[in-house]
Amino acid sequence: MGEPAAILVAARDEEQTVGATVATLRESFPSVEVIVADDGSRDGTAEEAERAGARVVRLPRLGKGQALTLGESEAPAGTLLLCDADLRGDLRPLLESGADLSIAVFSEKQGGGLGIAKRAGGALIRALSGFEAREPLSGQRALSATARRSCFPLAAGFGCEVRMTIDAARAGLEISERELALSHRATGRDPAGFLHRGRQLLDALLGCGPLGVNFRGLRLPLVGWTVGLRDDGAVTAIAALGLADDLWSGPERGFRGHLRAGRTTGMLKLVGIPLVGLIATRKLSGALLVGLAANFLNQLDTRPGRALKAYLIGALVVRAPLGTAVLLLPYDLREQTMLGDSGSNALGAMLGLSSVSRLTGSGRWLAIGALAALTALGERRSLGELIERTPLLSGLDRLGRGTL
């Protein structure tokens, strides 16, 4: 690959190790910029990295994959070298393989648990790409410019390495694993170690599921389909329609865009969601409420937590279920997961279905009128911009959300 364009290090609370890691990297690659993506550290990680000569990108606490993605956006184009903040050893041989994605395998095993997370990561890579990975969780990787374009933005959290290998293999790129004499601060068989490996396993599973890219360019797990796990068949059907749109939608947006395009997953939702509402309620007002409420929450789902907050406010009025939304809200706010169309449509449908049973006939038609007006407004102007320009709504919208 030649010399990398930049070296990227994700670090969180690595005050004791990051300085030595950066110093070693600068000694090995004296003309290459080292960028440390500080993932919300609460100690002196950033200061130690800067003292050792790195450029630090300070971030809220998001997750490893998110930190690497945002750090990568600060790096010049070309080959990229990734390194953990507690690494000791020489990574120069990693750039000699000639492969598009070169992954370091530690020559000596250090610490570790029962191997569950590692075996699961390898099994996921094999099942989804066919590649047999010796070291699916290694964070020491060299990416050619082509691999960088294929793999970034990375999956969230500790799922970034597993999904990176899958994406590179699916793109037909050459992958090499090279055994190197490296060491790092190994986790042991203690509560902290098992918690860390449990998080690795969960993030790998989520990273291999449906993913979406948010407004900031972060590639996050789409977990809104979990709303459809309720006993209510109508909500399940609408979550499935939304998931189809998440997975296979095109660039079309809004009613007019989908009508012009014709056969799209958006058109499937435009027809299917009100039809499900009609079957579930046997009322025209029910079909309209379910369809309009699902579309309204979908229009709001452009910033972390926005659609979920709107749902919770509406749920208190019509006494819709709160449980799943309350559980998802903190992860959505911290940009660790996304609702996607599956979640926002399903939550909107739950509001619509609850409205049919809780509101009187005139109340339902009043709600239909209000939702229709908001839908028409959203076709002409951005509802998000209106929220951000209204002080009271803007304050509520930003509440609990991390800032960059």
Image: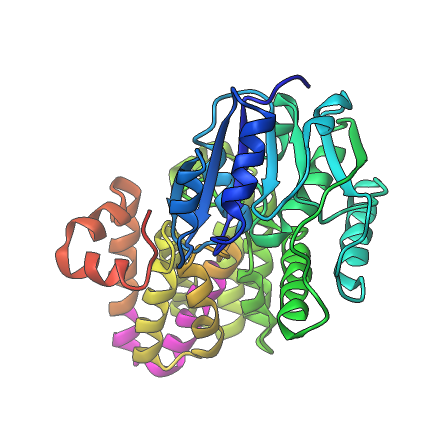
Whether 252 is drawn above or below 327: the answer is above
Q: Residue furthest left?
A: 391
Whether 348 is drawn above or below 150: the answer is below
Way the structure is coloured: rainbow
Q: Is residue 122 left or right of residue 310?
A: right
Q: Nearer the viewer, residue 272 or 76?
A: 76
Residue 204 position, x and y percent, is: 67, 55
Q: Is residue 364 left or right of residue 111?
A: left
Residue drawn at x 22%, y 53% as measured from the top left: 387
Residue drawn at x 51%, y 54% as measured from the top left: 16
Q: Nearer the viewer, residue 138 or 256?
A: 138
Residue 195 position, x and y percent, is: 63, 69
Locate the N terminus by quadrant: top right
Residue drawn at x 60%, y 59% as measured from the top left: 240
Q: Quadrant of residue 351?
A: bottom left
Count of number-bearing discs: 0
Q: Which span is picked out in magenta?
A: 345-365
Secondary structure mostly taken by the magenta-highlighted segment of the chain: helix
Please indicate, yes or no, whether residue 294 appears anywhere in the rendered image: yes
Q: Is residue 348 magenta?
A: yes
Please indicate, yes or no, whether residue 282 appears anywhere in the rendered image: no
Q: Is residue 115 left or right of residue 195?
A: right
Q: Is residue 357 magenta?
A: yes
Q: Quadrant of residue 25?
A: top right
Q: Nearer the viewer, residue 367 or 30?
A: 30
Residue 347 position, x and y percent, is: 45, 66
Q: Is residue 133 left or right of residue 336?
A: right
Residue 115 position, x and y percent, is: 80, 62
